[in-house]
Image (spheres, helix red, strand yellow):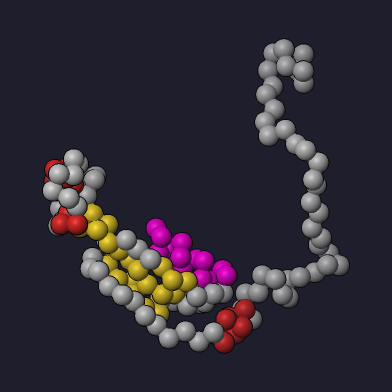
Amino acid sequence: MHAIASRHYAFEGRCYVLCAGSYLTLDDLPADFEPREALEAGGELGQADGVILPGGSGIIGPDGAWLAGPVLNEPAIVAADLDLDRIAGEQLALDTAGHYHRPDVFDVRVDTRPRVPATFLGPGSPDRP
């Protein structure tokens, strides 16, 4: 799921995203780690092949495309050349703060008055008979 979310961050933000996924195997755990037997058995807590967390690190461009990775089931260092000029070009396709900015139609108002976070309604409450 983190890979899907990271691609979304890149596409929506029109930015580069460095996606760091954890890679962990049974061999990385101490021998006296209590749930080790359950992890070795696989099923809900782990994978039968010894991989507990598969990784998934990579680098995503401002269009949501992978530039490096995702690397799964092995430790790795990912690298890519980033062209920062691409960001301006990608913003032409989706610019959430530029050409959508319409002060003649929209404005932002912040009400700073104190608010009650929850109101309970029921028999005998002040708001109900």
Q: Image point 81% across, 60% down: which residue?
A: 107
Query: Residue 79 location, x and y as percent?
Result: 37, 80
Q: Looking at the image, can residue 128 be seen?
A: yes
User: Which picture quadrant has residue 88?
Assistant: bottom right
Quarter of the image where the N terminus is located:
bottom left
Query: Residue 11 location, x and y as percent?
Result: 53, 71
| Residue 99 part of the magenta segment | no
Q: Is residue 81 left or right of residue 22?
A: right
Identify the main secondary structure in magenta: helix
| Residue 8 part of the magenta segment | yes
Query: Residue 5 location, x and y as percent?
Result: 46, 61
Q: Image point 83% across, 67% down: which residue?
A: 103
Q: Residue furthest right?
A: 104
In this view of the protein, which residue sits in the foreground, 60 or 35? 35
In this view of the protein, which residue sits in the foreground, 128 or 38? 38
Q: Image point 72% across, 12% down: which residue?
A: 124
Quarter of the image where the C terminus is located:
top right
Query: In the rendered image of this protein, does residue 102 appear above or below residue 113?
Result: below
Q: Is residue 8 left or right of residue 94?
A: left
In this view of the protein, which residue sits in the foreground, 13 or 112? 112
Q: Magenta span covers which residues?
A: 1-13
In this view of the protein, which residue sits in the foreground, 52 or 120? 52
User: Which picture quadrant has residue 70?
Assistant: bottom left
**How many tags in the picture?**
0
Q: Is residue 66 left or right of residue 107?
A: left
Query: Residue 127 location, x and y as percent?
Result: 77, 21
Q: Looking at the image, can residue 47 be seen?
A: no
